[in-house]
Image (spheres, rainbow, N blue to C red):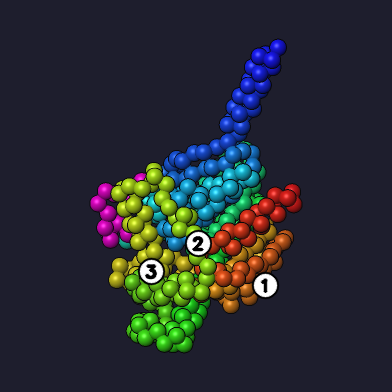
Amino acid sequence: MKYSILVSLVLLLSVAFAKEQDRSINEAKFVLIGGIEQWITINGNDRSKPIILFIHGGPGSTMSQYSNSMYKGWENDFVLVNWDQRGAGRTYGRNVPEKSNETYWIENPLTVDQMTLDGIELAQYLAQYLDQDKIILLGTSWGSILGTKMALSKPELFTAYVGHAQFVNFSENIDFAYHTVNQLAKNANDTSAVKILKHLGPPPYDSAKNYGQLLRIVKDYERSNSTPAPTTWFELDPEYDNETDSKHRYDGDDYSFVHFVGHGKLGIKSMVRDINFNKTGISIKIPIYLVQGENDILTASDVNKPFFDKIVAPDKAYFLVPNAGHGHNPSIVAKQFEIVQNLVSAK
């Protein structure tokens, strides 16, 4: 009798485990988006849970290679989707010629419009593939531009938009960053930074290199005034820890950044030069929640809070996080999780 009960219990546990396995999803694959193959990863313990589509920053700063270390544990409550955008990571590597050069950059421009269409097509694919009606959008930095454009273009696809380090107007953001960091450098008697900034002068610039020099100084000052992210968040998954993937990430980052800021010598114009959400992003038909590092210089609260105040949306909230800069850290991620959990609870 005892033996029979034990066998029955084992069988019941086996069936329960099998059902649990059936509900989970862990996929990494190329899908045809915008006429090219693009790389996505999908991870969740229950495929029926709400989908979060992460729109990475950079552009070019993919997140798929980190195996969701930053968002570990979220798989219990959500299906997490990372996407190597057009021109980034494995998507870049899949579509770039073996011997690419500046001619390829010139002849294959990145545009916000095309990448917005890519994002919408991906969202439609995910909704159909996972049999869900809507998706939560979570965009950071450059991804906040792309995420906002997607939310404005097809609001019916999305439950809500959560923006982190929200860009409003690249020209205004970068000008504010220059003058802020220039004053900080002078106050700190940072002669090296002051010298570089004096040589650069205020933006706009005709060279991607100049933007890169300015952003390095901005990052240094943000880093010195914020709590850093754990190094474990950025440890590569073994699958991506190889020379080929590393090259594609590095080259894609350069390619994407040049199109982001523009480069006069190559005749490449900034793909965000005409973005101004103060004019085009005030009316949003879905809930919008912005998470902002208090010490963020590049996308400062001085610029995006006045924009947020003007927004008309079904629901909105603005969260200023202490001891945080432009990038992710534990406080930023905790606030993001609180927001998405509240979205689910409200249903």
Mark in the foreground, 1 or 3: 1
- Residue 99, x across and y down, in percent: 25, 51
**In this view of the protein, can residue 173 be seen by the observer?**
no
Kind of residue indicated by mark 3: Gly
- The answer to whether marks 3 and 2 mark residues whose Cβ atoms lie closer than 8 Å is no
The crowding category of the residue bearing disc 1, from other C-alpha atoms within 10 Å (few below 14, some 14 to 19, many at least 20), is few
Of the residues shown, which amino acid type is indicated by label 1?
A: Asp
The single residue placed furthest to the right in the displayed view is 346
Q: Which of these two is toward me, 14 or 332?
A: 14
Q: Secondary structure at mark 3?
A: loop
User: Left or right: where does residue 156 sit relative to residue 33?
Assistant: right
Q: Residue at x 42, y 58 (%)?
A: 60
Point out residue 74 in the picture as x, y percentages from the top left corner. 59, 48
Of the residues under marks 1 and 3, which one precedes in the sequence? Answer: 3
Q: Which residue is mark 2?
A: 229
Q: Which mark is residue 309?
A: 1
The kind of secondary structure element at disc 2 is loop
Q: Residue at x 39, y 52 (%)?
A: 89
Residue furthest to the left in view is 99
Give the magenta part as a residue range. 93-105
Residue 138 - label: none
Relative to 79, residue 171 above or below? below
**Front in this rendered view, residue 256 or 339:** 339
In this picture, residue 162 sits left or right of residue 30:
right
| Residue 101 sits inside the magenta stretch | yes
- Residue pointed to by mark 3: 262
Q: Amino acid at mark 2?
A: Ala
Circle 3 or circle 2, nearest the eye: 2
Q: CA distance from mark 1 to mark 2?
A: 29 Å
Asked if residue 210 lies in the magenta stretch, the reply is no
